[in-house]
């Protein structure tokens, strides 16, 4: 199956993902992954900067400069999310969500506020938000990953310090035909 | 709408409990006031960006501190 066209990634996703040995799976799932300027400024470690600069040089990553329409919608998303009775969204994630809405990009994040906002705010209807959980699942479904799904998810947790919600992981493992 | 809000509230509460349970509180309490406050904020909210602003660090620098404090990033 061919790669989808565009995604846009936020900081928490990129710094986790860059620590994983199979991180280039990202570039087999998407033709180009945009990195907003706001987010590039938050990256500090040599490992992450090196991976991002190599990706930018190869064209699998691209810089996303925030345009006035994206910033306007992002500011509205920040405000509206703060009226919800749960964790809100900050500007960097809101920029990704706004680009998802206006440009049709898949939003890559590990931010629960962003996930909740995409589900609850009318301004973001139709935006697709994926975490590493969905990306790795998609990697298996498209035959881009092989081996035991349970072991691959465990490997991701060990190498990135991320934690998948147990119930959701069990559902995914059953779906992939692995042990839950 | 209410059911969706309730679902997210429940997920948030479960994640918060896990962060509280697994955090290295000895490490957190030994940090200077600004970092200690930021780590405690992160335990309660899971909000990496705001926690990094409280700490006066970039998001990636704060994420390294989070790992040293053994606070899981649940998502």
Image: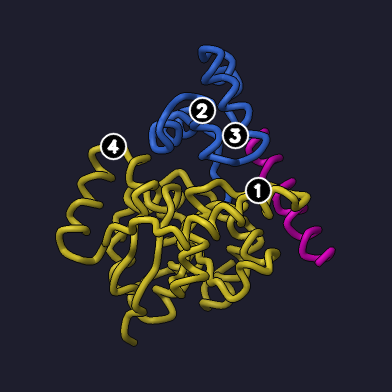
Chain colours: A yellow, B blue
Are the residues under marks 3 and 4 on the same chain?
no
Q: Tell me which secondary structure the magenta stretch mostly adopts.
A: helix
Q: Nearer the viewer, residue A56 or A153?
A: A56
Q: Residue at x 69, y 41 (%)?
A: B16
Element on which disc 1 rests: loop
Q: Residue furthest right?
A: B2
For disc 4, the chain is A
Residue bounds of the magenta highlight: B1-20
Residue matched to label 4 = A45
CB within 8 Å, label 4 to label 2: no
Tag in front: 2 or 3: 3
Are the residues under marks 1 and 4 on the same chain?
yes
Q: Residue furthest front?
A: A68
CB within 8 Å, label 2 to label 3: no
Are the residues under marks 2 and 3 on the same chain?
yes
Of the image marks 1 and 4, the number of the one nearer the N terminus: 4
Magenta span includes B32: no
Residue matched to label 2 = B69
Tag in front: 1 or 4: 1
Residue matched to label 3 = B42
Left or right, residue A153 beside residue A147: right
- Distance from the alpha carbon under mark 2 to that under mark 3: 11 Å
Left or right, residue A120 beside residue B6: left
- Distance from the alpha carbon under mark 3 to that under mark 4: 21 Å
Pointer 2 local density, CA inside 10 Å: few below 14, some 14–19, many at least 20: some
Residue matched to label 1 = A88
CB within 8 Å, label 2 to label 1: no
Are the residues under marks 2 and 1 on the same chain?
no
């Amino acid at each position: 199956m061919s790669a989808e066209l565009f995604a846009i990634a936020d900081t928490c996703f990129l710094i986790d993902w860059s620590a994983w040995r199979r991180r280039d799976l990202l570039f087999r799932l998407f033709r180009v992954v945009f990195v907003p300027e706001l987010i590039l400024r938050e990256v500090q470690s040599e490992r992450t900067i090196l991976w991002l600069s190599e990706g930018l040089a190869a064209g699998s990553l691209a810089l996303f400069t925030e345009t006035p329409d994206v910033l306007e919608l992002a500011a509205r998303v920040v405000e509206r999310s703060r009226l919800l009775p749960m964790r809100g969204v900050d500007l960097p994630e809101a920029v990704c969500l706004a680009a998802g809405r206006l440009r049709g990009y898949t939003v890559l994040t590990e931010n629960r506020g962003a996930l909740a906002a995409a589900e609850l705010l009318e301004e973001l209807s139709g935006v697709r938000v994926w975490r590493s959980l969905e990306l790795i699942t998609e990697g298996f479904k498209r035959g881009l990953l092989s081996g035991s799904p349970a072991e691959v998810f465990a490997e991701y947790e060990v190498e990135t310090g991320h934690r998948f919600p147990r119930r959701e992981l069990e559902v995914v493992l059953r779906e992939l035909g692995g042990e839950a | 709408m209410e059911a969706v809000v309730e679902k997210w509230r429940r997920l948030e509460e479960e994640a918060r409990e896990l962060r509280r349970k697994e955090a290295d509180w000895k490490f957190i309490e030994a940090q200077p006031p600004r970092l200690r406050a930021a780590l405690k904020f992160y335990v309660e909210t899971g909000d990496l960006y705001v926690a990094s602003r409280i700490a006066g660090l970039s998001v990636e620098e704060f994420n390294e501190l989070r790992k040293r404090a053994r606070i899981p990033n649940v998502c």
